[in-house]
Amino acid sequence: MTARPPGPHDSLPNTHDRKDSTMNDHAPRISVIGTGYLGATHAAAMAEMGFDVVGVDADPKKVQALSRGDVPFFEPGLPELLRRHVDSGRLRFTSDLADAVAVSDVHFVCVGTPQRVGSFAANLDHVQEATRAVAKAMTHDGVIVGKSTVPVGTAATLRAMIEPLIAEGVHAELIWNPEFLREGMAVEDTLHPDRIVLGGTTESSEAVMRRVYAAPIAVGAPVITCDLPTAELVKVSANAFLATKISFVNAIAEVCDAAGADVSVLADALGHDARIGRRFLDAGLGFGGGCLPKDIRALMHRSAELGAFSAASLLQQVDEINMGRRQLIIDRAVEALYGSVLNRRIAVLGAAFKPHTDDVRDSPALNVAAALHLRGAQVVVWDPEAVPTARRDFPTLSYAQDLESAVRGADLTLVLTEWPEFVQADPAVLARLVRDPQVVDARNCLPAAAWEEAGWTVLRSGAPDADAPQRPRSRTEARSPRRVAELVAR
Ligand code: UGA
């Protein structure tokens, strides 16, 4: 017989009616508060691991959609997982938090912590509200598990905040268990976490959490137990490190540009050093999304509050370098169009902040597209998944139906998100559609030789630019009568 990871019900009588049942006999029943990317994925993954799960969201439309098995955002594999467990009855969704908490033992708080308006600090309103509501609703012993990304010190404040709210005779513990899932890989990352961090546990809450994560632990996921502030900081430091790695390679890309070196080859060579590693060394347009930018800013803010100025100034620089990448690509586009984008048709390939998601939060691609649009370019955007979300946030941009219609008649093509659809596109076919076969490969993702062979001029950052000497050096040169005549004659 082959060994299998222990299931949540192994050797556990299923008694759902005892006040002190959490820590003892039956499989912990789970509530997940907040059903965004993190919560919806976590709820479905917990059901997949064999638990009874109730997902809670204040938005009734979201609850209705999820209850039908519909995921209101694009995340590969999640609709299938969700539908399977909604159908099996192991997973349900409700707006009634008190009801969900009453039938559960472990309560995961997965609500958002967006950047506060007018500040770099995180907005903790939702976390406080959700935690308070759970504490008030607890009718029996249980563990409140913070999963949201929060500034260090938050969990201790929450502990103090809920203490007077817990009903007499109920034993409640608040611990922190940060999440490291990546959008586009959320299901895989949640089912097979590369580490499980448990902050502020006691012996009994650690035992409960080890049962909750029995499946990944059985296949080797390391468990790190620590205090609350360490757990909170592990999460933001991980994102800060990833952001720093990206900004590092982008800073080196600038040196490569100046020196005529190739940053992609350099990154490959660096990556062979196991101490460095190749991942997150892709130079280009830099990072965006709902996590890295806001998390480094919140950490910058919190570090400064705590007087830890080295971290604050390092992250400031990381952010500056990152935002500079967007400007660099805008400048490249202007330069490629000889100094002015006015009324020039620009095909923007990519709207999502990275491939395999429809998330456009702080998307570098849309930032560039919008800036060029505001300078008078006719920008046409195409993305395999993110057109509807992009249209919602940037309704004044034009959107194409497909790749071919996006590039048709383009004076310039920008590849701003490295979707496989763009990387694998046939450059010869696209070259026949555009007005001028010049592409800014802002993610250094295209097979440049094949594109050049198909007649394209490929402009990359951090790569030797074969065409550079022939390009106009200045605005005056760009506007010279000869240049204008050339353009008109095309
Ligand atoms: C990030 C972290 O990777 C997760 O571990 C974390 O759990 C998550 O934030 C979170 O806090 O919830 P995610 O926002 O999904 O995940 O995106 P990443 O895959 O980290 O990519 C972030 C950005 O960096 C993207 O815009 C991507 O294009 C960019 N990037 C990534 C680069 O510019 N270069 C690289 O080499 C890698």
Image: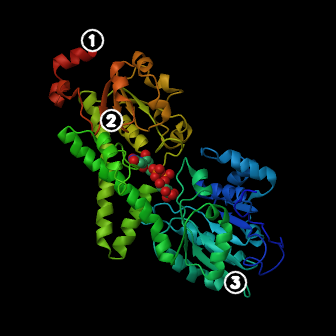
| Cα distance between the residues tagged 3 and 2 | 60 Å
Q: Which amino acid type is marked by label 2?
A: Arg
Whether ligand 1 has any atom under 8 Å from the Cβ at mark 2 is answered as no
Dot 1: few (<14), some (14–19), or many (≥20) neighbours within 10 Å?
few
**Residue nearer the viewer, 132 or 140:** 140
Mark 1 vs mark 2, CA separation in Å = 24 Å
- What distance separates the C-alpha of mark 3 from that of mark 1? 80 Å
| Callout count | 3
Of mark 3 and mark 2, the one earlier in the sequence is 3
- The colour mode here is rainbow
Disc 3 is placed on an element classified as: loop
Rendered residue at 41%/15% (across/down): 432
Closest to the camera, between mark 1 and mark 2, is: 1
Residue ID at (55%, 46%):
184
- In the rendered image, the residue lying farthest to the bottom is 168
The circle drawn on residue 375 is: 2
State yes or no: discs 3 and 1 in contact (Cβ < 8 Å). Answer: no
Residue, disc 3 = 171
Residue hosting label 1: 489
Question: Is residue 429 visible from the viewing direction of this image?
Answer: yes
Q: Where residue 207 appears, x then y in whole percent? A: 66, 76
At label 3, the amino acid type is His
Horizontal side of 438 relative to 180 (left or right) equals: left
